[in-house]
Amino acid sequence: MKLYDFKMAPNARRVRMFIAEKGLDIEKFEVDLGTRAQLGDYRQLNPLAEVPALELDDGTILTESTAICRYLEEVYPDPPLVGRNPLERAQVMMWDRRVEQHGFAAVAEGFRNSSPVFKDRSVTGPADFPQIPELAERGKARFANFLVLLEQRLGESEFVSGARFAIADITALVTIDFARTIKAGIGDDQANLKRWYAAVSTRESAKA
Ligand SMILES: N[C@@H](CCC(=O)N[C@@H](CS)C(=O)NCC(=O)O)C(=O)O
């Protein structure tokens, strides 16, 4: 297998962390988003021009971080990162999707609509779209609301999706680290988030 990766890309980091938690050794190939390599020959591999992508030994290409992780979970079930029974799996995926939709997407909206690096590239993919400054503001406000939701959740649960570390924690950690790009983060009064962040960010896999 081979992972098409970019060190600074948060979606790629989600998969790298998942791979590290599983203890897998997968070859990596850097697609330099800084020089827009994703818009060149790489599009033959992924027409959506995004990383990560996982190439299987038979040449099959998988894209979308969650789909890649679900595949790895099936093939390498230990340690389980997507729940241990039907209910747990649903809860893990429910929280992972919430984090993705209300946290990660909010940061991406804020960052891509404000950073000069993304001028005319406010949306990933082959087509160019101009930045909309109002969306940068909205992204920041949405992320603040997301932290309130997560603070409340972590007051009732050790990890994001329940009693065990799972993929939703990976997505949440990557999202919170990604939020540095919009100069946002855990508030001084968000004690549950601080407790959880201290535990999760010091896992070996967080270095991935
Ligand atoms: N839905 C995809 C999104 C992947 C994505 O947005 N990747 C970003 C890096 S984090 C990318 O490739 N961006 C290319 C660009 O900015 O043109 C997934 O979950 O893997």
Image (cartoon, rainbow, N blue to C red):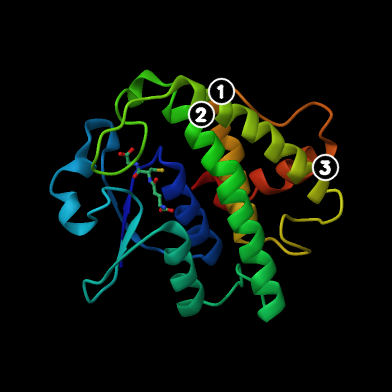
Q: Is mark 3 within 8 Å of ligand 1?
A: no
For the residue carrying disc 3, how many other residues have a C-alpha within 10 Å: few (<14), some (14-19), or many (20+)? some
Which residue is at 28% across, 31% downward? 34
Q: How far from the left and from the top, in percent, is residue 208?
A: 48, 48
Image quarter of residue 80: bottom right
Which residue is at 36% across, 37% downward? 123
For the residue carrying disc 2, how many other residues have a C-alpha within 10 Å: few (<14), some (14-19), or many (20+)? many
In the image, what residue type sits under mark 1? Glu
Badge 2 element:
helix
Identify residue for label 1: 137
| Whether residue 204 can be seen here | no
Please report whichever mark, 1 or 2, sits nearer to the chain's N-terminal start: 2
Badge 3 element:
helix
Q: How far from the left and from the top, in percent, is residue 165?
A: 69, 60
Identify residue for label 2: 110
Which part of the image, by quadrant, shows the N terminus?
bottom left
Q: How far from the left and from the top, in percent, is residue 104?
A: 55, 43
Q: Nearer the viewer, residue 173 or 2?
A: 173
Kindly indicate whether the residue at mark 3 contacts the one at mark 2 (C-beta within 8 angstroms). no
- Name, please, the residue furthest toward the left: 41
Which residue is at 62% across, 47% downward? 172
Badge 1 element:
helix
Identify residue for label 3: 192
In the image, what residue type sits under mark 3? Asn
User: How much space separates mark 2 and mark 3, taking CA atoms?
Assistant: 24 Å
Image quarter of residue 114: top left
Kindly indicate whether the residue at mark 2 contacts the one at mark 1 (C-beta within 8 angstroms). yes
User: How much space separates mark 1 and mark 2, taking CA atoms?
Assistant: 6 Å
